[in-house]
């Protein structure tokens, strides 16, 4: 683009040359000057219009680029929002899976503890009658007759009868205690 001022100067210099060549008559110089001024005005008007058109094109281009940038930004934001949503959903699924695993682990631990407690109860329950069996009078065996030879057989039988009666009384008492013990265990240990 040419600057309007430089064209005007060219026109003015041309005008001066023509004036110098014609001489001092000057009749054409006013008409030529008005013609040159009209031409200069027209050139300036064209230049202004071109500059205005260029300015409008630049403005339109800037607006188009701004709109494109806005659309790209909106697209990126939408994409980021979708990615965030997917990531949040994945995190929620992972958290839910972790929670389910933890619940299952706690359930298994409780079940293991319950089984262990039941096993311990069964063992204690089996041990109680074993301990008592050793102490029960029913396990008491009478001494052999050879050891009691120094006493008479009658005396031995009388003693033995007395021992049998006390033995039977103790057996009934122990059996009653055993039943009470078992009931107590069932009530408190289960």
Image (cartoon, rainbow, N blue to C red):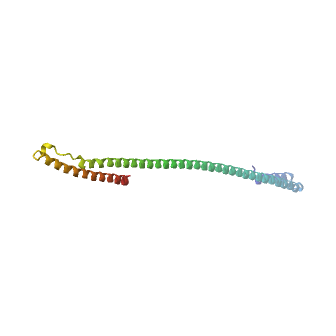
Residue 128 visible, this angle: yes
> Considering only vertical position in the picture, is 146 above or below 3?
above
Using residue 134 as the reference point, say whether residue 116 is left or right of it: right
Residue closer to the observer: 106 or 77 = 106
The residue sitting at 71% across, 52% down in the picture is 63
Q: Residue furthest left?
A: 150
> In the rendered view, does 30 fall on the left or right side of 81?
right
- x and y, in percent, of residue 12 in the image: 80, 54
Q: Residue at x 33, y 49 (%)?
A: 125
Specify whether 168 is left or right of 63. Answer: left
Q: Quadrant of residue 153?
A: top left
Q: Residue at x 35, y 47 (%)?
A: 122
Q: Out of 21 and 76, give the one closest to the viewer.
A: 76
Give the x, y percent position of residue 45: 81, 54
Question: Which is nearer the eye, 25 or 182?
Answer: 182
Q: Residue at x 87, y 52 (%)?
A: 22
Where residue 44 appears, x then y in whole percent?
A: 80, 54
The answer to whether residue 66 is left or right of residue 162 is right
Determine the residue located farthest toward the front in the rendered image.
Answer: 154
User: Does any portion of residue 8 appear in the rendered image?
Assistant: no
The foreground one among 4 and 179 is: 179
On the image, the x and y values in percent for residue 141 come to: 20, 45
């Amino acid at each position: 683009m040419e600057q309007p001022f430089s064209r005007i100067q060219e026109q003015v210099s041309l005008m001066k040359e023509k004036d110098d060549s014609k001489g001092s008559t000057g009749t054409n110089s006013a008409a030529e000057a008005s013609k040159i001024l009209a031409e200069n005005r027209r050139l300036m008007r064209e230049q202004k219009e071109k500059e205005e058109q260029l300015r409008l094109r630049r403005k339109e281009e800037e607006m188009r680029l701004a709109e494109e940038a806005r659309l790209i930004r909106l697209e990126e934001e939408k994409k980021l929002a979708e990615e965030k949503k997917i990531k949040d959903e994945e995190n929620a699924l992972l958290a839910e899976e972790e929670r389910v695993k933890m619940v299952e682990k706690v359930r298994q631990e409780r079940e293991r503890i319950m089984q262990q407690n039941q096993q311990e109860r069964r063992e204690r329950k089996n041990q109680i009658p074993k301990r008592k069996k050793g102490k029960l009078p029913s396990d008491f065996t009478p001494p052999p007759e050879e050891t009691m030879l120094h006493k008479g057989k009658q005396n031995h039988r009388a003693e033995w009868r007395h021992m049998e009666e006390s033995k039977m009384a103790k057996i009934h008492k122990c059996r009653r205690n055993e039943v009470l013990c078992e009931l107590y265990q069932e009530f408190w240990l289960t």
